[in-house]
Amino acid sequence: MGGRSNRSSHQATEILKAFWQHEVSKPFIAFLGLFIVSAVLSPAFLTPYNQRVLALQTAPLALLAFGESMIILMGSIDLSPGSTMALAGTVAAITFVHYKQPLAIAFLAGIAIGALVGFINGLLVTKAKIPSFVATLAALVAGRGMVLILTGGQPIVGLRAFGVLTMDIGPLPTMVWLMFFFTVLNFFLLTYTRWGRYIYAIGGNEEAVRCSGINADLIKLMTFTLAGCYYAIAGLMMDARLEVAYPWTGWGAELDAIASSVLGGIQLTGGVGSPIGPFFGAYVLTLITNVLILMGVNPFYQWVVKGIVLVVAAIALTRGLRYVK
Amino acid sequence: MRTLGIAKKTLIGIVVAIIIIAVIAGVVASLYLAPAPGKKKLTFALLVSNLGNPYFVMLKDGAEAAVKELKAKGIEVELIVYDAKDDPDLQVRQIEEAIAKKVDALLINPVHKEAILPAVRDAVKAGIIVITTDRDIADKSLRVFFTGTDNVYGAELAVKALIEALEKSGKPKPWKIVILHGIPGTTAAEDRKKGFHNVLDPLVKKGDVKIVAEEIAYFRRDKGLEVMESILARTKEIDAVICANDEMALGAIQAIEGAGLVPGKDIIVVGYDAIPDAVEAVKAGKMYATIAQSPFLQGYWAVMGAYYIVVKGWKPPKDFIPTPVVVVTKANVGTFSEEVAKPKPLPGAPSE
């Protein structure tokens, strides 16, 4: 009797240990903790409407965070997500409204532009050897400028048809399903493909990767391009949410994307972190803003509370590390 | 090898010589070809806070219309437009750049009323005329005049329109109202906040109105949407939303529709600025009212004022030249734009 219960409790601790050692455990626990605290603090938090709103608000940010986290995993940084999403959203809207192309073509045009921006970022980093911080800063500034040139500063209206992204399929809107789809895709890509493993390897020890004959430049180029596609999809989602291509979409979103990645357990030094961590990071970031409004906290205090919550979440994430930079 | 070395040296010598000659020629040309004083070309710098906002695009249009009009009169004038993207640091750098370019006047639409003061002081020291447009700066002694909306007055008109709509709707008192504010620290946001409260606070005391939420949405449509979604998650018992600009109001309308409510019927929305999208929303009955300012005239009058001051030594009779304000509702939605978007003579301007 005693032996068996001993063994089962032993098994339980093994499972718990395995979970705790998994990279995604800490972001998940930070997420779960904040979720429970929010539910306790505000009765409105758990309502279906609020959960739906949260999912809708998280979806574009999660896509940005997935792209950003891949770049950070390589030990680089990407400052262009916000501008890229706005540019992709603008180009998709122009293709649809001004050139009267079908919706699918408009979406593809937007994604292609995102890929192009990512590709250029990749070229600047690998061929021109400009540090990613500077290269993508250029993309951040120039991308927003192009949005303003293309739109003339005026939102592009007439995007009702983009509602395919916000309409419900079953219990949830399309874009929320898309977010889940990309969470799974990102997990699969980074965990089970050679490309994904190389991304981690480059962040871990790029010199070793290059010495072993792997074309690290090509991997970087591909990853920046894919990240651009992710940002573009986020841009299409914002178009759908606002039913216009708003030129100021994603202004400042690069910081949210980086924060989501870090809250998701992706280390800024590269090479470490779970592919699905950024999803939890994005959700946590959205949740904090949401619950503070639900509680009616004075907007000025909201900023302070947000800062404190971020620090607490970050403390939880870095337990067990010997040092950080 | 040796001949190659000599060829290389010669080539470098030629290149260096060309560069030196080009630099000297450039300096000489700039000294001798500079326009004679008196017939000098006028240069004005227009520093816009954010060209991503359609409102400021209209301001720029007005300034450009004035430049075109002056050019048609045979006056040589150039307008340099800067976009600060709502970043005070960037605006400071742009002011410094404009000073370096020795412009005749700075027409500033400040991002922040305090942050740019040191740079503006440098401009005044350099003898450059400073005019503020749409938003003023904190130190009023630095600029010759400010042209813009009396935002406190405009915000009072907006809330009065909202109250009028609530009375017409027959909704029971106390009316539950949500307020969305702009970027804290900007004159427009602070003045409109003051205007809203000037009218609402006495009504709150009387028990006619209850303010259920007061949030900041940074003058942005996407933030308006997200903030309003969260407010609606807290309570759907809301009678009206008043916003410090149209972008936030349009975001709020999007959120209201997303929550399955009807904007204009279940929740009455009032915006501010009368941007094209908002005018469409008023036509469609989704927005009850918006306040039309005259960004066009703010740009137009700033350029005209600068011209009169620099060329004719004009002294404006007052240092605040308010531009017209119109409440836009379904009743006048077709005609208001003519009232505010065409050139009008600058009040107190010298005769030609």
Image (tube, grey):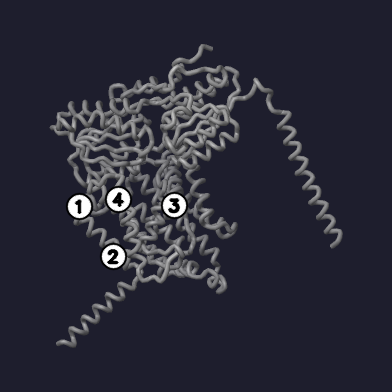
Q: Amino acid at mark 4?
A: Thr
Residue A6 drawn above or below residue B216: below
N-terminal of the two: label 4 or label 1? 1
N-terminal of the two: label 1 or label 3? 1
Chain for disc number 3 = A
Q: Nearer the viewer, residue A219 or B131?
A: B131
Q: Position of residue A83 (x, y in %)?
A: 45, 48
Extreme-right residue of the structure: B3
N-terminal of the two: label 4 or label 2? 2
Are labels 2 and 3 on one chain?
Answer: yes
Could you tell me which residue is drawn at 41 percent across and 26 percent down? B148
Assess whether mark 2 and mark 4 are in contact (beta carbons under 8 angstroms): no
Instruction: Please state if B260 lies on the left or on the right of A74 as rendered.
Output: left
Are labels 4 and 1 on one chain?
Answer: yes
Chain for disc number 4 = A
Could you tell me which residue is drawn at 28 percent across and 41 percent down? B215
Assess whether mark 2 and mark 1 are in contact (beta carbons under 8 angstroms): no
Extreme-left residue of the structure: B172
Q: CA distance from mark 1 to mark 2?
A: 20 Å
Q: Secondary structure at mark 1?
A: loop
Q: Position of residue A296 (x, y in %)?
A: 23, 46
Q: Secondary structure at mark 3?
A: helix
Is residue A58 at all visible to an observer of this figure? Answer: no
Q: Nearer the viewer, residue B221 or A41?
A: A41
Q: Amino acid at mark 3?
A: Pro
Q: CA distance from mark 3 to mark 4?
A: 20 Å
Which residue is tagged 1? A42
- Is disc 2 surrounded by few (<14), some (14 to 19) or many (20+) residues within 10 Å? some
